[in-house]
Image: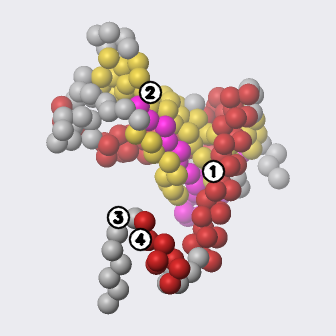
Amino acid sequence: MNTVFKSVASSYVSISELMLPSHTNFSGKIHGGYILSLLDQIAFACASKFSGNYCVTASVDTVNFLKPIEVGELVTMKASVNYVGKSSMIVGIRVEAENIQTGKIKHCNSSYFTMVAKNKEGLSVPVPGLILSNLDEVRRFSNCLKQIDLKKERELHEEEFNYSSIETIASFSKYNVQVQLG
């Protein structure tokens, strides 16, 4: 077991950036891909700060785009390590956009990135244990445990599910799909 423990607060990273016209998609809103790039950067910074090592993105577990972000809004991303495994960490990120004229703030996105600490040779290395200091941190940790269990359940389903059975294919009739196997 780990003898080194660090607080969730020691992982906190926050970035703010003004959204420019060059960040827009074809509908004039801030491009989701641009936001994803910023999310990956802050997840890296948060995990690296906490672990003291270079970190790589193992998976992007959830990205929920809740509200569009407009040109001219100030986007702030707040990240913290919510869960640690042996060499992995789940980083939770909250994205808010502020209308800088009115001061109105909206929650635009919540994301969860699984990051893995690596050494100079590219091998996974242990990360510090996590100190949970308040009930919000306990709630976030618990939610990560649920997320991990659901991921394992999905993977098991993938291994065991018979996609080619007549029953499976027949059940598709209630969806907007045609099966035309050649």
Q: Quadrant of residue 64?
A: top left
* Tag count: 4
Q: Which residue is mark 3?
A: 176
- State which tag comes first along the sequence, 1 or 4: 1
Q: Position of residue 57 (x, y in %)?
A: 50, 54
Q: Residue at x 32, y 33 (%)?
A: 68
Q: Residue at x 36, y 19 (%)?
A: 98
**Residue 113 on the magenta span:** yes
| Three-letter code for the amino acid on which mark 1 is drawn | Gln
What is the crowding at mark 2: few (fewer than 14 residues within 10 Å), some, or many (at least 20)?
A: some
The mark found on residue 107 in the picture is 2
- State which tag comes first along the sequence, 1 or 2: 2
The mark found on residue 173 in the picture is 4
Foreground pick, 44 / 30: 30
Q: Which residues are magenta?
A: 107-128
The mark found on residue 147 in the picture is 1
**Residue 89 on the magenta span:** no
| Three-letter code for the amino acid on which mark 2 is drawn | His
What is the crowding at mark 3: few (fewer than 14 residues within 10 Å), some, or many (at least 20)?
A: few
Q: Position of residue 145 (x, y in %)?
A: 70, 49
Mark nearest the camera among 1 and 4 is: 4
Q: Measure the C-alpha gap from mark 2 to mark 3.
A: 33 Å
Q: Say which element carries label 2.
A: strand
